[in-house]
Amino acid sequence: MDLLTTPLHDAFAPIAISFVLAAIGLNIHYGYTGLLNFGQAAFAAVGAYGMAVMIVSFDVPLVPALLLGLVFAVLLALVMGLPTLRLRADYLAIVTIAVAEIARLVFSTSFKSYFNARDGVQGFTADFRALNPYPDDVNGVLGFSRNDLWVVTVGWVLVALVLVYVALLMRSPWGRVLKSIREDEDAVRSLGKNVYSYKLQALILGGVIGAMGGFIGALGKGSVQPDSFNTDFTFIAFTMLILGGAARVMSPVVGAVLFWFLLTFMDVLLKRITGDDGFVPGWLLNPDQTGNVRFMVVGLVLMLLMIFRPQGIFGDKKELAIDAR
């Protein structure tokens, strides 16, 4: 039954959790505040590299290394936001996508004694795995190894805590101001609110949550490589957010889980119907092409969603909708 078990495994794996947290951060940026951040990959990369380099190169313990990774994410948000948030939204979009690419190139080509170029950073998971409470005989449970199961447990607990925090925050006066900024920032400014300050706070908070996604992805893989944080990372996280419905607390989780399930399901299905044991002839589709075809099929499903339900699965069309027509 790998047609179902494999997609379910991937939908709840560490890489999926990494994207869930990145999408939650984007939900604060875009869904609640209306900020166009196309550089969420940079926050995840800074968090992951900050934690890994601090542990490997400077022998910093796990918890302080995690805190330093969050500090680096805050500094990155300040670099992105301070010069741009007083300007139109498209300036932030341009800056964030540029900063994300610059960060990836820096990690790929500079300070090789710390970042190890494209080979990335490894050897930083020992302290985390030492905290693993699961016995050795849990290998293979739900398809996860003992170490992966520990990462998955910590990751989903972290997601739950972040969701509760975001839900409470968005019901507070601070969260209501963010929604008002999204609708009409001039009106909010006329009421005496410092729109620039609120936008910067939202950018920082969403970036910090994105850095947490970088932590989980790195701990799950056991390494950090720059190619893991290219522009596709941000756009996939955005896709997950829009799929679930922006400006809804649970939408990034549902969108991410559904996206990974569909992607893996199509991969397994296409491999079954092609090849020597399949009924699809090789001249029409061979197993080497299934990786690209699955993206085409999932992309078609997303296109239909945007046409018939542009606000996403749980989104409210009256509050926020993506006009696909």
Image (cartoon, rainbow, N blue to C red):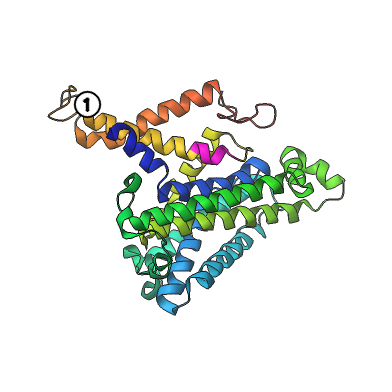
Q: Secondary structure at mark 1?
A: helix
The image position of residue 254, as x and y in percent, is: 51, 37
Asked where in the image residue 205 lies, by quadrant, the reply is bottom right
Q: Quadrant of the C terminus?
A: top right
- Give the residue at x 37% y 35%: 263
Q: Residue furthest right?
A: 191
Q: Is 280 placed above or below 59 here? A: above
Please give the residue where the numbered disc 1 appears in the rendered image. 273
Q: Is residue 251 magenta?
A: yes
Q: Is residue 183 left or right of residue 23?
A: right
- Would residue 229 be seen by someone viewing this image from the given angle? no
Asked where in the image residue 245 lies, by quadrant, the reply is top right
- Would residue 321 be seen by someone viewing this image from the given angle? yes
Q: Nearer the viewer, residue 286 or 87?
A: 286
Q: How many marks?
A: 1
Q: Residues within 10 Å of mark 1 (few under 14, many from 20)?
A: some
The image position of residue 83, as x and y in percent, is: 66, 59
Q: Is residue 88 magenta?
A: no
Magenta stretch, main secondary structure, is helix
Asked where in the image residue 278 lies, by quadrant, the reply is top left
Q: What residue range appears in magenta?
A: 250-255
- Give the residue at x 67% y 52%: 202
- Give the residue at x 41% y 26%: 300
Q: Nearer the viewer, residue 28 or 232?
A: 28
Q: Nearer the viewer, residue 261 or 325?
A: 261
Q: Is residue 183 left or right of residue 263?
A: right
- Give the residue at x 17% y 22%: 279
Q: Is residue 51 left or right of residue 209?
A: left
Q: Is 173 placed above or below 298 here? A: below
Q: Amino acid at mark 1?
A: Ile
The image position of residue 177, as x and y in percent, is: 77, 46
